[in-house]
C-alpha cells in the first residue's frame, strides 16, 4: 500500500476487523451465541477483571453494565484493529499476524466458557480468515491505494498529464500545484527550488516515504467505497447473526408453557400495601422493571424439553429431574423480595415479585444430605455457581426452585426455565438462574464464583431502608410534604421505620400492610416542610429489635450499611 497514510491504514484495519466480527456473528448463529468472539472475550473480561473494576461498572452503569462492557470491548478491538492496519501498511505479514492473534484470542476465549466444544472456535477462526482476506485486499490487493501517476516532461508540445497543474490533494501534506506545472514544497529551502516536471525527492515530505504522497483520486475513491461496503456488509452480517440466534431462542417454547395451579397460593396483596404515592416504588415489581445483575453477557437459551436438574454430591439418593418432572410436583406460590449484594445504600437493585415453584426443602429431604454437607452449590448452565447454606434451605422458609414469576413462566432473562429464590439471602449466594445442578458439598471444600473474588461465603440480607420521594432534584413547596419509601429485612420483617430532618429528633413513619416478613414494606411520613435546604434521613428496625447501623460500609464483602439521606430545597 505504497500511498497509504496512517489514517487510511487504520481505516483498512478497522474494516478488516469489522468483516471478521460480522462473519463470526453469522457463524455463531449456528454454533451458539456464546461462541461469538465479542461475547466470549467480554465474558473472559468479566471473569478475570479485578473486583474493584466490576463494582465500578455496576455502580456507574447499573443494569446496563453488560451493554457498557460489550461497547467497551468493541472499542478496544477497534483500537487493536487500527494498529493492525498500520502494521500491515509497513509489512503485510505483520498485519496478517495481528489478524491471527485477533482470531486466536477469540477462539481461546470461546473455549474457556462452560460447556464449550470444538465447534465454538469456528466463529473466531472463520472470521479471522475473512478479516485476513479483507486486509490483503486493502493493503496489497485490488483495493490498494495507488500513487498519482507521474511521467517525465516532453521537450515540446502540450504539457503531459503529470506536468499539468493539479488541485491540492487533501491527503497531500505540503505539495501544491502551480499554474506553470511546478510542484513546490512550502517546506523546501529557498536555495533548493524544485525542477518543473520532476518527481519529489525520495524520502522528502512529498516523497514515497513521506506524509505528502499524492494518491490517485480514482484509487482513493475505490478504497473508500470498498471500506464503506465492507463496513455495511459487516453490520448487516452482525445484525443478521444476532437475529438468527434470537430465532433459535426459547421464546416460543416459553410461550407454549401452561403453568400448573399451586397447591398453596400466595396470600392476596392486602389493601393499602401499595400506597400509590408518586415516585414510590410499587409494592409488586413488574417483570420488565425487575433488576437484573448476573455475569451472562448473552442470555442463556435453555430448551425446557432438554433441561435437566441433577441433585448430587454428598447425598444418599442422587436424582435427576426433567422440566416435566418438576411441573408435575406440588407447587407453592409466594411473594419474595430479592436484593443484590451490590445494592448501594438507597439503591434500586431490589424488587418484589410473586414466584411459583417447588420447595427446595422437599427435594433435599428426598435425596438425603449426608453429615457435613453444609453447602448447596447451585450451578447455572453457563457455569456460574452460588453456595447456599444447607440450613437456610431446610429451616422452613419458602426457598423455591421457581418456574413462574408474577403469573407467567420465568422471563428468559430472569432464569427460564428454572431458577432459585431464597428469602433472606443476597442473590449472589442463593438466586442461581438457568440452574442445572444442585450439588451438596461443604463450605470448607468449595468456594462459589464470588468467594475467591473477595465476597463473603454467606450473605444474609441486612436491614435497610430507602427514601423514594421526595428526591434530591425535587423542589417541593413549603407545607405538608409526603415523605415515602421502602424498607426490608427479608425473613425477619420490618417492625419500625423512622425519619428525621436536619439531624433533629427521629419521627416514626407509618408502615403500610405487607404480605409477609419475606417482602419489603412501604412507609410514609407527613413532613411540615419549611423553606430552605434540608436533609432527610431514614432508618429501620427489624422484628428482632435490631436497628440498622448508621456506619457506612461498602457493598463488599457482604452488603452495604448506613442510613439513606436526601438533601433538597423547599421553596
Image (cartoon, rainbow, N blue to C red):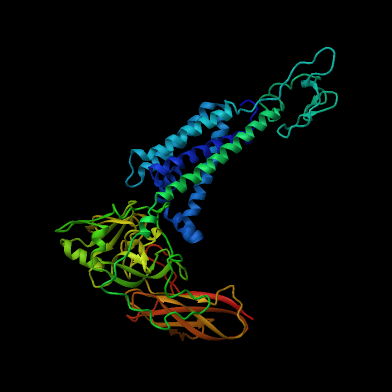
Q: Position of residue 318 (x, y in %)?
A: 17, 56
* Horizontal relation, residue 97 to residue 442: left or right: right
Q: Quadrant of the C terminus?
A: bottom right
503, above or below 256, in the image: below
Residue at horizontal 34%, vertical 43%?
116
Residue drawn where x is 40% and y is 65% of the image:
340
Depth check, front residue: 25 or 507: 25
Question: Is residue 52 shown left or right of residue 447?
Answer: right
Residue 92 is at least partly visible in this image: yes
Whether residue 56 is visible: no
Quadrant holding the N terminus: top right
Answer left or right for 241 relative to 174.
left
Q: Is residue 411 above or below residue 353?
A: above
Q: Quadrant of residue 570?
A: bottom right
User: Picture coordinates of residue 467 (x, y %)?
Assistant: 49, 76
**Of residues 422 and 232, which is closer to you in this image?**
232
Residue 278 x/y as whole percent: 53, 77
Q: How many dots with numbers?
A: 0
Q: Is residue 404 above or below residue 134?
A: below
Farthest residue to the top: give it: 155
Asked whether 487 or 533 is in front, the reply is 487
Q: Nearer the viewer, residue 448 or 385?
A: 385
Which picture quadrant has residue 51? bottom left
User: Residue 346, position in %: x, y?
Assistant: 47, 71
Amino acid at each position: 500500500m505504497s500511498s497509504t497514510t496512517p489514517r487510511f491504514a487504520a481505516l483498512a484495519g478497522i474494516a478488516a476487523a469489522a468483516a471478521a466480527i460480522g462473519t463470526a456473528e453469522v457463524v455463531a448463529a449456528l454454533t451458539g451465541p456464546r461462541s461469538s468472539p465479542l461475547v466470549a472475550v467480554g465474558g473472559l473480561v468479566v471473569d478475570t477483571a479485578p473486583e474493584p473494576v466490576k463494582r465500578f461498572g455496576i455502580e456507574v452503569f447499573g443494569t446496563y453494565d453488560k451493554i457498557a462492557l460489550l461497547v467497551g470491548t468493541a472499542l478496544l478491538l477497534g483500537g487493536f484493529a487500527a494498529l493492525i492496519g498500520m502494521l500491515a501498511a509497513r509489512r503485510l505479514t505483520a498485519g496478517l499476524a495481528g489478524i491471527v492473534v485477533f482470531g486466536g484470542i477469540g477462539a481461546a476465549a470461546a473455549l474457556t466458557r462452560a460447556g464449550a466444544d470444538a465447534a465454538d472456535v469456528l466463529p473466531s477462526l472463520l472470521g479471522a480468515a475473512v478479516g485476513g482476506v479483507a486486509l490483503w485486499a486493502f493493503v496489497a490487493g485490488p483495493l490498494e491505494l495507488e500513487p498519482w501517476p507521474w511521467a517525465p516532461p516532453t521537450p515540446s508540445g502540450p504539457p503531459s498529464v503529470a506536468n499539468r497543474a493539479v488541485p491540492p490533494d487533501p491527503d497531500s501534506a505540503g505539495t501544491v500545484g502551480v499554474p506553470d506545472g511546478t510542484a513546490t514544497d512550502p517546506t523546501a529551502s529557498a536555495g533548493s527550488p524544485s525542477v518543473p516536471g520532476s518527481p519529489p525527492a525520495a524520502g522528502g515530505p512529498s516523497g514515497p516515504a513521506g506524509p505528502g504522497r499524492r494518491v490517485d483520486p480514482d484509487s482513493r475513491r475505490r478504497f473508500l467505497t470498498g471500506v464503506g461496503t465492507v463496513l455495511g456488509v459487516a453490520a448487516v452480517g452482525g445484525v443478521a447473526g444476532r437475529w438468527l440466534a434470537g430465532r433459535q431462542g426459547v421464546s416460543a417454547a416459553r410461550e407454549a408453557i401452561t403453568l400448573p395451579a399451586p397447591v398453596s397460593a400466595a396470600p392476596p396483596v392486602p389493601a393499602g400495601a401499595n400506597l400509590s404515592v408518586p415516585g414510590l416504588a410499587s409494592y409488586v415489581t413488574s417483570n420488565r422493571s425487575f433488576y437484573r445483575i448476573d455475569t451472562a453477557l448473552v442470555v442463556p437459551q435453555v430448551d425446557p424439553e432438554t433441561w435437566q436438574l441433577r441433585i448430587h454430591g454428598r447425598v444418599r439418593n442422587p436424582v435427576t429431574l426433567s422440566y416435566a418432572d418438576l411441573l408435575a410436583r406440588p407447587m407453592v406460590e409466594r411473594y419474595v423480595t430479592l436484593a443484590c449484594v451490590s445494592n448501594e445504600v438507597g439503591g434500586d437493585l431490589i424488587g418484589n415479585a410473586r414466584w411459583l415453584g417447588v420447595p427446595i426443602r422437599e427435594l433435599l429431604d428426598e435425596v438425603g444430605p449426608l453429615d457435613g454437607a453444609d453447602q448447596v452449590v447451585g450451578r447455572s448452565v453457563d457455569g456460574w455457581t452460588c453456595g447456599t447454606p444447607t440450613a437456610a434451605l431446610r429451616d422452613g422458609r419458602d426457598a423455591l426452585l421457581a418456574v413462574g414469576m408474577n403469573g407467567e413462566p420465568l422471563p428468559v432473562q430472569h432464569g427460564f426455565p428454572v431458577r432459585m429464590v431464597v428469602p433472606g439471602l443476597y442473590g449472589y449466594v442463593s438466586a442461581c438462574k438457568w440452574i442445572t445442578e444442585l450439588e451438596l458439598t461443604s463450605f470448607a471444600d468449595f468456594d462459589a464464583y464470588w468467594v475467591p473474588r473477595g465476597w463473603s461465603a454467606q450473605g444474609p440480607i441486612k436491614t435497610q431502608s430507602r427514601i423514594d420521594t421526595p428526591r434530591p432534584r425535587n423542589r417541593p413547596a413549603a407545607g405538608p410534604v409526603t415523605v415515602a419509601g421502602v424498607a426490608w429485612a427479608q425473613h425477619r420483617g420490618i417492625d419500625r421505620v423512622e425519619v428525621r430532618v436536619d439531624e433533629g429528633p427521629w419521627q416514626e413513619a407509618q408502615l403500610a400492610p405487607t404480605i409477609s416478613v419475606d417482602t419489603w414494606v412501604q412507609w410514609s411520613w407527613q413532613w411540615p416542610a419549611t423553606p430552605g435546604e434540608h436533609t432527610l434521613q431514614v432508618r429501620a428496625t427489624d422484628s428482632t429489635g435490631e436497628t440498622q447501623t448508621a456506619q457506612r460500609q461498602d457493598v463488599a464483602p457482604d452488603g452495604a450499611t448506613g442510613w439513606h439521606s436526601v438533601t433538597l430545597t423547599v421553596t
